[in-house]
Amino acid sequence: VKVEIVTIGDELLLGFTVDTNAAHIARELGEIGVSIPWRSSVGDNAQAVAEAVRNGLDRTGAVITTGGLGPTSDDLTKPAIAELFGREMYHEESVADAIRARWAGLRRSGKIPESNFTQALIPRGAEIFANDHGTAPGLWLEDERGRWVAMLPGVPREMREMLANALLPRLIARTGAGEEGAVIRSRTIRATGIPESTLFNRLGPLATNVEGLAPAYLPGIEGVDVRLTSQGRTALEADSILDRAATAIRNALGSYAYGEDNDDLAAKVLDLCRSRRFKLSVAESCTGGLLGARLTAIPGSSDVFIGGVIAYDNAVKRSVLGVPQPLIEQYGAVSGEVASAMARGIVDTLGGDLGVAVTGVAGPGGGTREKPVGLVWIAAHGAVNECRELRLFGDRAEVRQRAAQAALDMVRRGLG
Ligand code: ATP
Ligand code: MG
């Protein structure tokens, strides 16, 4: 089964909105075995919308659009597609009622702006998808030959709900997809602390073929993700082949692999600490709180994470963390000696079992020949005792993020 996606909106073409709708729809459809051979984006222009949808119908007979359903004048998806299908628009009272009910529910004062009721104008013969999070309903329009267009709102949250509650069930029923049908499923193995090429070589023959699947390599700031995708198998078959393939990859990667799919390294670190009843604190210079932010972004972090100090100025390293001034003078603020002293200092100051420290040159300025931009020292004190020098590449933001990730990884490895 094939479906095309047409996302609508000038802001998509201008680059001010990233087209996350198309990506989300493609992933969700893949889960039920529907593939997307083609996708396009057009501006808020009736002719362009009609042309994109007509092309899609010619190729696959099935199109999902997002955007342009709202009450503003740039929202012209409905009339454009109604015309394409040769249907007139009529006022659907049940939609008008829903708009009034929603207005009342939101306790807005005053009269409903008349423009809202353009949303009650729908093409003859269209079926309505209720919108639980907004006023613009979604629509399903089908012609005599069974070719169809599903129109979803542009607002991502509204689109996602409508896709899940109305459109996916309908497509599953139509295509017989689901448990018995073929699905597209993916599994991602997350690795860190290893460059992409080294990882590739380490996998040997598995690098290009594992259980008949060809891994994809997605390097990023946090590390390298290895993604496996199964197509054309039932959900049961796909899951078991992905299990076997993921296990093979993980075994080959050894301790470089830290998780799967959406696993976050910070969550892994918290889990490892939690199972040992360790309390964790951080002392950060060049990461300026990123490490603490990564940890506190994980729900439930408070039973492990005590807190931290952003020791940016050397005065804070001295006065709050007790780093001796002679140490800073002799080795410099970016040094293993100072990193270790910061880690020890944060445990002394806040208590707990494990302190982690980061100090480095994030750039773009401030680098010297001996201490270039990207030089970062990380240290742990307490339950893990270690100090490491990193040579990170990238711009300021990347160096900071890579440093935070490396510090988390040092703890994971130390406790693992
Ligand atoms: P509304 O009823 O709110 O007007 P709509 O169906 O008319 O909804 P649009 O006006 O096209 O939708 O888009 C509303 C907002 O949703 C946009 O400003 C944009 O932030 C977001 N949006 C639209 N299309 C996409 C997309 N393809 N991917 C991600 N976000 C999108
Ligand atoms: Mg709109």
Image (cartoon, helix red, strand yellow):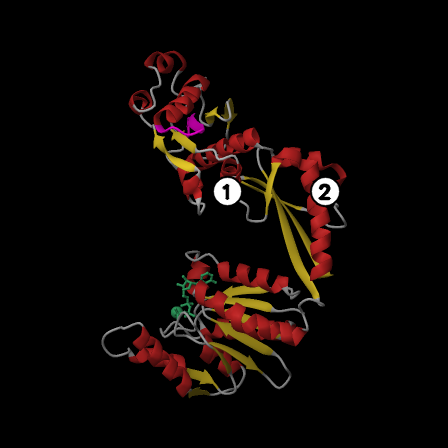
- Residue 158 on image: x %, y %: 44, 67
212 lies left or right of 50: right
Q: CA distance from mark 2 to mark 1?
A: 23 Å
The boundaries of the magenta stretch are 350-363
Name which quarter of the figure residue 338 lies in: top left
Q: Is residue 341 above or below residue 216?
A: above
Dot 2 beta carbon under 8 Å from ligand 1: no
- Residue 242 on image: x %, y %: 70, 51
Mark 1 packing: few (<14 Cα in 10 Å), some, or many (20+)?
A: some
- Please give the residue where the numbered disc 2 appears in the rendered image: 248
293 lies left or right of 261: left
- Residue 26 on image: x %, y %: 58, 62
Q: Point out the tag, 2 or 1, that comes first from the N-terminus.
A: 2
On whether residue 405 falls in the magenta region, the answer is no
Q: Going 41% across and 30% down the picture, which residue do you hit?
A: 352
Which amino acid does the dot numbered 1 rest on? Answer: Ala
Report whether residue 196 is seen.
Answer: yes
In front of the other: label 2 or label 1?
1
Find numbered disc 2 in the image and state the secondary structure of the residue it sits on: helix
Report whether residue 366 is seen.
Answer: no
- Please give the residue where the numbered disc 1 appears in the rendered image: 267
Name which quarter of the figure residue 178 lies in: bottom right
On whether residue 361 falls in the magenta region, the answer is yes
